[in-house]
Image: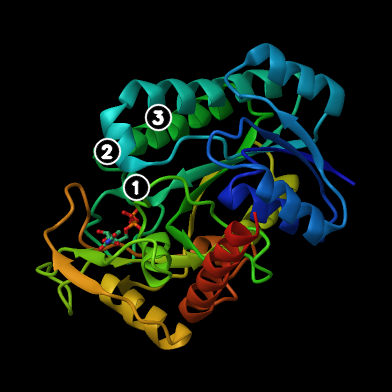
C-alpha cells in the first residue's frame, strides 16, 4: 500500500481527504501545524477510521523538521494542503500569507526532490480565474491579476510547480482548482472548525441559524444575475476529497505532467438560492438582511468540470441540498460538543 504525506491533513479539506485515502487503500501520514484546526478533528478521524493515522505536529516551512518526517516515513506521494486561506486576512497581512504559502511549498518541493518522490497533488483555487469572460470557466482560461495576496499566493505556487516540473520531468503534479467547498462528513465527526467570525457563506449561515450570529448579511443584491446576488459553484467537501484520491491514481499512470483541474459541481447557485435551500432542507429559521457588495467579490463563477470528469474519472455525487444538510448537522454537533465540554 502506498504511503501519502498529507500536509494540512488535520484541516477541513485535508481531514476529509484522509478518510478517502484510507477508503482507497492508501496510508495517510498527516503533517499539520494546527494553526487552523485542533484535536477534535483527530478524535473524529479516529472514530471514523478505527485507528489514528500517523501524525506530525510540524510546520511545513521548517525544512529540518519536515526532512525528519520524510526520512522516517519515506512517503510515495504528497498532497500539499498546508496554507493560510482567509482572503480578507491576506489583505491585512500579506507577508504572513506569502511567506507561509510559498515557503511551505518550496520546502515540500525541495524535499520531494531530495527523497526522489515524483507525485504531487496541490491545493489550488478558482480565485486564479478572477471574473472569467466565458462561463462555465475551463482550465484554458488565462489567470487574471489576483485581487488578494491569498489569490496571488496560489498563482505563484502554481507557477513554481509548473517551473519545477519543467526543470525536473520526474516530478508530476495535479493542480486542483477548488471552487466553493462546503458541508461536512455526513457522520458529523469531522468538518470545518469555527475560528473567529466566518468569512465564508455557509459557516456564516449555520452559525446564524444556531444563534451564534444575529443575522446573515447578503453582500450585494444588485449584481447582473437573475436574482441580483453573486453566483458560485458549491461542492460537497467529500466530493472534493475524493478527487484528490482520483488525482493520485491518475498521476500513477502519467509521466512528465503538470495539469490543472477544476473541481466544482459544474453548477452555479446564487447566494439567495443557497440561503433558500438551507432554510428549506433544514426547516430552519434564518434572519437575513441585504447589505452592500463585498469588495473584491467576483460577480459569478462556476466550473466546467469535464476535464476532471474525463481524465481523473471523477464526478460529484452529492447535491447542494445534501451539503447544506451535512453543514447543519455539523453545526449542531459542534454545539452539543460545546455544551458537553
Ligand atoms: N457571502 C455573503 N454573506 C456572507 C458571506 C459570504 O453574502 O456572510 C457571499 C459572498 O459575497 C460571495 C458568496 O457568498 O458572493 C460566497 O462567498 P465565500 O466567502 O463563501 O466564498 P468566495 O467565493 O468568496 O471564495
Q: Mark 1 points at which residue?
A: 127
**Residue farthest front in this picture:** 340
Q: Quadrant of the C terminus?
A: bottom right
Q: Which colour scheme is used?
A: rainbow
Is residue 54 in view from this perspective?
Answer: yes
Q: Where is residue 121 in the image (x, y as percent from the top left)?
A: 62, 42
* Numbered label attached to residue 146: 2
- Residue 284: % across, % down: 41, 82
Q: Does the image show residue 247?
A: no
Query: In this rendering, is residue 75 above or below 246?
Result: above
- Crowding at label 3, few (<14), some or many (≥20) Cα neighbours within 10 Å? some
Q: Label 3 vs label 1: CA separation? A: 12 Å
**Alpha carbon of mark 2 to alpha carbon of mark 3: how far?**
10 Å
Q: Which mark is residue 156?
A: 3
Residue in the foreground of this view, choosing between 291 and 323: 291
* C-beta proximity under 8 Å, tags 2 and 1: yes
Give whichever of 147, 93 is nearer the camera.
93
Residue 49 occupies quadrant: bottom right
* Kind of element beneath mark 1: helix
Circle 2 — which element? loop
Relative placement, left or right, of 304 versus 186 is left
Residue shown at the point (71%, 32%) measured from the top left: 118
The first of marks 2 and 3 along the sequence is 2
Marked residue nearer the N-terminal end (2 or 1): 1
Q: Please give the name of the residue rendered at 22% of the width and 55% of the height, measured from the top-left corner.
A: 298
Earlier residue among tags 3 and 1: 1
Residue at the spot 26% in from the left edge and 76% down from the top edge: 272
> Is the distance from the Cβ of mark 1 to the nearest ligand 1 atom less than 8 Å?
yes
- Label 1 Cα neighbours within 10 Å, binned few <14 / some 14-19 / many ≥20: many
Please give the name of the residue rendered at 61% of the width and 24% of the height, measured from the top-left corner: 60
Amino acid at each position: 500500500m502506498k504511503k501519502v504525506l498529507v500536509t494540512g491533513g488535520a484541516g477541513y479539506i485535508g481531514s476529509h481527504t484522509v478518510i478517502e485515502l484510507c477508503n482507497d487503500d492508501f496510508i495517510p501520514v498527516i503533517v499539520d501545524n494546527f494553526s487552523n484546526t485542533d484535536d477534535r478533528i483527530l478524535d473524529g478521524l479516529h472514530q471514523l477510521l478505527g485507528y489514528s493515522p500517523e501524525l506530525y505536529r510540524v510546520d511545513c516551512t521548517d525544512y529540518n523538521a519536515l526532512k525528519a518526517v520524510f526520512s522516517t516515513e519515506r512517503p510515495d506521494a504528497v498532497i500539499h494542503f498546508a496554507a493560510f486561506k482567509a482572503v480578507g486576512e491576506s489583505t491585512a497581512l500579506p507577508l504572513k500569507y506569502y511567506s507561509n504559502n510559498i515557503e511551505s511549498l518550496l520546502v515540500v518541493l525541495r524535499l520531494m526532490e531530495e527523497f526522489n518522490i515524483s507525485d504531487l497533488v496541490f491545493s489550488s483555487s478558482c480565485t486564479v480565474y478572477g471574473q472569467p469572460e466565458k462561463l462555465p470557466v475551463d482550465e484554458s482560461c488565462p489567470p487574471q491579476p489576483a485581487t488578494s495576496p491569498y489569490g496571488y499566493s496560489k498563482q505563484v505556487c502554481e507557477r513554481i510547480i509548473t517551473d519545477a516540473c519543467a526543470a525536473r520531468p520526474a516530478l508530476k503534479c495535479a493542480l486542483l482548482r477548488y471552487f466553493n467547498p462546503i458541508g461536512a462528513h455526513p457522520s458529523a465527526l469531522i468538518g470545518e472548525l469555527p475560528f473567529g467570525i466566518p468569512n465564508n457563506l455557509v459557516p456564516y449561515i449555520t452559525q446564524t441559524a444556531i444563534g451564534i450570529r444575529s443575522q446573515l448579511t447578503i453582500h450585494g443584491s444588485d449584481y447582473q444575475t437573475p436574482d441580483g446576488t453573486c453566483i458560485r459553484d458549491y461542492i460537497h467537501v467529500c466530493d472534493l476529497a475524493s478527487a484528490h484520491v482520483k488525482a493520485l491514481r491518475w498521476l500513477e499512470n502519467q509521466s512528465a505532467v503538470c495539469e490543472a483541474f477544476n473541481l466544482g459541481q459544474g453548477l452555479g447557485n446564487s447566494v439567495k438560492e443557497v440561503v433558500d435551500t438551507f432554510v428549506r432542507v433544514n426547516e430552519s429559521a434564518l434572519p437575513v438582511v441585504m447589505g452592500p457588495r463585498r469588495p473584491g467579490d467576483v460577480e459569478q463563477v462556476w466550473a466546467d468540470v469535464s476535464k476532471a470528469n474525463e481524465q481523473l474519472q471523477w464526478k460529484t455525487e452529492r447535491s447542494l441540498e445534501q451539503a447544506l444538510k451535512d453543514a447543519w448537522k455539523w453545526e449542531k454537533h459542534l454545539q452539543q460538543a460545546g455544551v458537553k465540554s
